[in-house]
Amino acid sequence: MGFELQSFEEDVLQASHTKPVLVDFWAPWCGPCRVLGPIIEKIASEQADRWTLIKINSDQRQDLSQQYGVKGIPAVKLFYKGEVIDEFTGSLPEMAIRQWLNKALPSEAKDQIVQAEALIDAEDTKGAIRLLEEALRSEPTNSTACGLLASLIVFEDPDRATKLAETAGTGEPRFMQLSSAIKTLSTFLPLDLDDLPEEKGADAFKRAVLALKEGQYGTSIEHVIEVLKVNRFLLDDGARKLGVALFTVLEDTHPVTASYRRTFDMWLY
């Protein structure tokens, strides 16, 4: 994919009225530029639906560097509707760049995500899912929307939740642990429970998974604790993995977490 500037007026100013344009001022002799460049190009290719990357050689276009106050490189500036709306200077790690983009990029999806989070707090799961689906239709790689939706649908559609969680985990640190938890739940939810080994705790583990599928999270954790009491090693420490993953998805403020986490932790040691 080509990112080089052809016409600043067309490629940046005019184009930014349709989609945000990220301008990377760089130079061939600049070491940090050579580190930052491939990272930004990788993210630009992944998020082409959200923004466009244009790279400007600051040695060749000193006029633009002076016009936009470039005092050091690499200098990254985000244009929207013809104006610079955010910027940073110097090389940043990939995760920091993704976080910066998620905060800096303007979009209707952001408003939908804010509304969805309010609905989640109000326990209106259906309404939240509808808004998050709308956000992802316009921004399929939005990590916040992916992470929130994954946590809401993991018990009904674990396969899709896993894919969403993978996208979310690359975008924001807060979703990395959630992504791992959703993947764990997604390995247990489709299990053929009739194939479980005939060991102590197997029946309780079956009841835990069945309760989880029915949305009875407290009951599920109760059965998980039963397993911990009699056979910690069932399914390679499966009860602990299931419990930790469920608490992670529910988060600390959920009533089930508040009611059962201490007892669960007690049986781990």
Image (cartoon, rainbow, N blue to C red):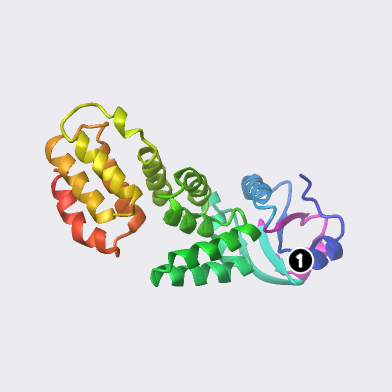
Kindly tell me whether residue 72 is visible in this rendering: no
Which residue is at 51% across, 49% downward?
164
Q: Quadrant of the N terminus?
A: top right
Please identify the quadrant where the C terminus is shown: top left
Q: Give whichever of 76, 121 is nearer the camera.
A: 121
Q: Amino acid at mark 1?
A: Ser
For residue 73: magenta? yes
User: How many numbered badges does the structure rendering display?
Assistant: 1
Packing grade of label 1 (10 A; few <14, some 14-19, many >=20) is many
Image-quadrant location for residue 228: top left
Q: Nearer the viewer, residue 183 or 28?
A: 183
Answer yes or no: is residue 129 visible: yes
Instruction: Indicate whether 116 appears above or below 191.
Output: below
Q: Position of residue 51 (x, y in %)?
A: 69, 58
**Residue 255 is a magenta residue:** no
Read off the residue under disc 1. Answer: 16
Task: Where is residue 6? Give x, y as percent.
Answer: 86, 55
Q: Which residues are magenta?
A: 50-74
Q: Residue at x 27, y 31 (%)?
A: 235
Assign a secondary structure to mark 1.
helix
Q: Which image quadrant for residue 34?
A: top right
Residue 24 drawn at (x, y percent)? 70, 56
59 vs 150, left or right, is right
Residue in the picture at 18% in, 28% down: 199
Q: Residue 63 location in percent, x, y?
A: 82, 65
Apparent side of residue 34 relative to residue 100 in the rendered image (left or right): right
